[in-house]
Amino acid sequence: MSTRYGLYFAPPAQSALWSFGCAVLGWDAETGTDAPQLAPPSMDAAAFHALTEDPRRYGFHATLKAPFRLAAGTSAEDLVAALHDFCADRAAFRLPALEVRAVGANAAGDAFIALVEPETAEGATSALAALERDVVLAFEPFRAPLAEAEIARRRPESLSERQRENLMRYGYPGVLDLFRFHLTLTGRAPAAQVATLEAELAALYAEHVVSRVADPGLTIDQIAIFEQVDGGRFTVRQRVLFV
């Protein structure tokens, strides 16, 4: 049996934000069940289901340490214990309400839609960057080296030199100074659809999250271990609160 683990920020399971993200993706990683999908009006249900196929496999989250196989001599129980120790030394911090934005555009203009920090959230960016750096480095001993097939899937020939260095050193291109906090809502959308999807998903976010809570800001106060077994969809193995 092949198992991978990711260290993620995931909104609290009872929050409006978690419900929204799970509805957009069509998958609730907390319960391990499909969620009725919330599709933007410009796309039919089948097309949007296809567009969200890849992020649905990972569940609604923001990556802190990308999925990895466990290193020899370590166990899932060791990982959980280490996360408890790590979180015992962390302090919670608060972000302003997230924004829906197109990210990761390629040369053709195709892009993902994600929830990201407001551009003015400089202090939160610093706190997030520190958290991600500490998670990446502290849990590196638990990560098995990438197999050749895992490296190939990242298409290293398409990466920058710094991204390739990160891939080989930490198992993921977008870490440390290349880290950008985001909760993915779609797969890569064609350029012609990006602006419409961005606007429609922003309207749905406003309707289903911002309008339903007194303060739509986001508290970062926990890290979740997500688990993937034999290439299936990721589920929440455990959430650990900062103490």
Image (cartoon, rainbow, N blue to C red):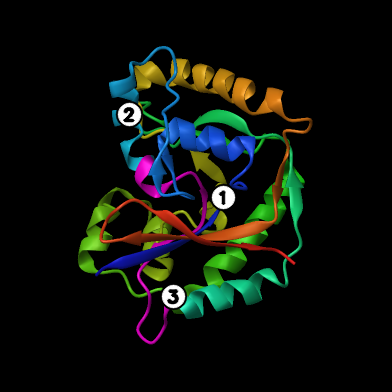
Question: Residue tagged by mark 1?
Answer: 10
Residue 90 in magenta?
no
Question: Residue tagged by mark 3?
Answer: 76
Residue at far top of view:
42
Q: Amino acid at mark 3?
A: Ala
State the SS at label 3.
helix
Q: Residue 169 in the image: state x and y as whole percent.
A: 41, 70
Whether residue 185 is visible to the viewer of this picture, yes or no, is: no
Q: Amino acid at mark 2?
A: His
**Residue 65 versus residue 93 in the image, above or below:** below
Q: Residues within 10 Å of mark 1 (few under 14, many from 20)?
A: many
Seen at 56% across and 56% down, the residue is 177
Seen at 38% across and 62% down, the residue is 167
Q: Earlier in the sequence, mark 3 or mark 2?
A: 2
Question: Residue tagged by mark 2?
Answer: 49
Q: Residue 21 in the image: state x and y as whole percent.
A: 51, 36
